[in-house]
Image: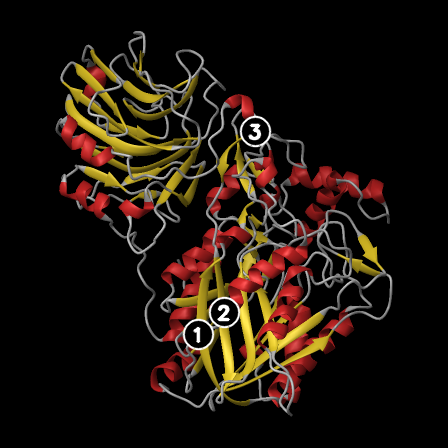
Amino acid sequence: MRLLIPSTIAAVFVMSITHVSAELKAGAAVVDVTPSKFPVLINGGMTSRNASEVITRINARAIVLDDGREQIGIVVVDSCMMPRPLLDEAKQLAAQQTELKPDRILISATHTHTAPSSMGALGTDADVDYLPVLRAGIAEALVRAAANLEPAKVGWAVEDAAEFTALRRWIRRPDRLADDPFGNPTVRANMHSGSNWDDVTGESGPEDPDLSMISLQALDGRPIAVLANFSMHYFSGQKALAADYFGMFSEGLQKEIGRSGGDHPPFVGIMSHGCSGDIWRRDYKKPAAERDPFKTIEDYTAGLLQIAVNAYSTIKHKPDADLAMAEARPVLKYRVPDRQRLEWAKKIVADLGDSPPKTREEVYAREQIILHERQTTQIVVQGLRIGDIGIATTPNETYALTGLKVKLQSPLPKTMVIELANGGDGYIPPPEQHVLGGYNTWAARSAGLEVQAEPKIAETALQLLEESAARPRRHYQQSRGRAATALAKARPLAWWRMDEMSGTHAVDSSGNGRDGHYETAIAYFLEGPASERLCVDGETNRATHFAGGRMLARLPELTDGYTVTMWFWNGMPNDARDVAGWMFSRGHNNGLSSGSEHLGVGGTATRPGRLVFARGDGAEPLVGSTEIARWTWNHVAMVRDGTTVRVYLNGNPSPEIEAETSTGVGLTSDRCFFGGRCDNESNWEGRLDEIALFTRVLSPAEISSLGSTKEHVVSSPAVQTASEF
């Protein structure tokens, strides 16, 4: 990928190499940016709305840092999103009154959906009367924070707050597609579709449960500010105007950590928005009655705040932290409408006249006109360092996976990612998520950037962190626990851990160079099985979710004596179709030869939920005896021993299936398919992990050692029968 960082920031890179220690100073301030003129427009919804009542004040909270050579400003505003041109103006205002440079200022929105509208999105325009209030308030917050600079020390903490966040975007069944705003049945994944388990096969991505905090104290230990970061979209349910849980958390930190009295400036608590484009608080993995453990925003905030306060007490602060910051402003394309869609949009907008759009169709028709007129946009991406702590930014509603990509590869292991920073450029789904469709992908200002925007922005953020840290990024590689080590020692021909975060290749971890190739219609980095045995030090094992695509590999060494093993997680109801899904197939691509063979989970055509083995010669399939519950991890091994086939489940030395079958031309094929059948019939809908293929017949004892589930804890969704969905 072309380097997106301008050469003008090279000086920052050199400075961060030579400047190894400095006297850190920090100052913080809060400025009220609540509007005084009502009613005021509120964005964050599909159509326009306004408010005249103030539930909680709207604030801009700022931190300024200075190491004697570099000065950095950070502002977090109670806003849904803010446009880059407005923020650039605020940065210029602050620069005129302080020593801050515009490209050393980070300004982000919390993403509360009950704040004044400062930019147009979907059916809501910007409130023009509010823009001067916001612009001036942001600049004033930076000016006040700079005036409060004093010698300081900095520390870091991160805690698991998984109970407070969950994946809101779920993959729909292939027979339950929904229509997009343009009348096409393209929606394989969408927000909140997990509310009905019968409609979905599983989550479309991973969560990020980390609550991260950067703490700044005076040299005597007096708290100056805490900048927190968490990936949860917003609580919702409040009436406008309100700062949502972000503001309540910030105020709660003030009460719990701040010290009163004296002539010192008051402590400032700040909650910034982590990568939450596909995240919300309701956990659809749980039964409906258990999805909302926090009935009120007060309960939710109090619980999250308690985790933060406990973590704060463990922070070790260090003085003499130096600063570095880098910024890039690449230009990206919009996904503009083709001629047919543009004509459709023009007709609808013409019928609207001067009226605001009131239906989903009208909203998206107007958005097509806007994208066509704009074509491209400039965005801002930043990477900065405070001692050994890194902050990366995106100007988008960013999926949790993207945040994990940056954190896990950052050159600084202490890294937070702040989204909706320095602009509001809409959702950036990873490219594979565009194939699955849904609201987060529908072309509009709220999700209009080019398909490759996500990898470009993530790569730019990593490059900027490398510049600021003066060191290369880390190479992410999933750790090997005792079970993974045992699998490697068994010397497979190929071993795919299925732990990719992006790309088209399934990396062969055996060392034999037999990489596989992913087709489209998949999702990366989902939670896999047996993390405590396959990984170490609490790392989450990762898996790939298949949603119609497959993983292909060519293995010419295969004969009629081989073994394939893998972990599998079926997302389809067992009785939803003739075959719940085929997870492994050997044969010719896009065809079904008489000698091809296939392993899957049966449906209504056999015995639902049992392992099933079939050949392409039309013979009756072989069916196992154990019913496998949907949404549970299980281990399977299929052994081809000449004319004999044996299939083992969960390390049981007694096979589920054992039979004599004929060999045929299909067994000479070097093509293996995982996550689907060679002819794409009833492809797998669910996850696969730790796929290994051996050019020998494994014994029952070897299979038992690789596939025992005695220590394995099944992950959610909670196991339910079909009648309970």
Circle 2 residue: 213
Nearest the viewer among 409 and 387 is: 387
In the rendered image, the vertical position of residue 28 relative to residue 446, given as above or below: below
Q: Is residue 550 visible?
A: no
CB-based contact (under 8 Å), mark 2 and mark 1: yes
Circle 1 residue: 315
Residue at 50% across / 20% down in the picture?
Answer: 576
Residue at 58% across / 49% down in the picture?
Answer: 280
Circle 3 residue: 199
In the rendered image, the vertical position of residue 550 relative to residue 448, given as above or below: above
Front disc: 3 or 1: 1
Nearest the viewer among 432 and 452 is: 432
Q: Is residue 598 visible?
A: yes
- Between the C-alphas of marks 2 and 1, the distance is 9 Å
Label 2 element class: strand
Q: Quadrant of residue 654?
A: top left
Residue at 60% across / 71% down in the picture?
Answer: 253
Q: Earlier in the sequence, mark 3 or mark 1?
A: 3
| In-image side of 417 versus 474 (left or right) | right
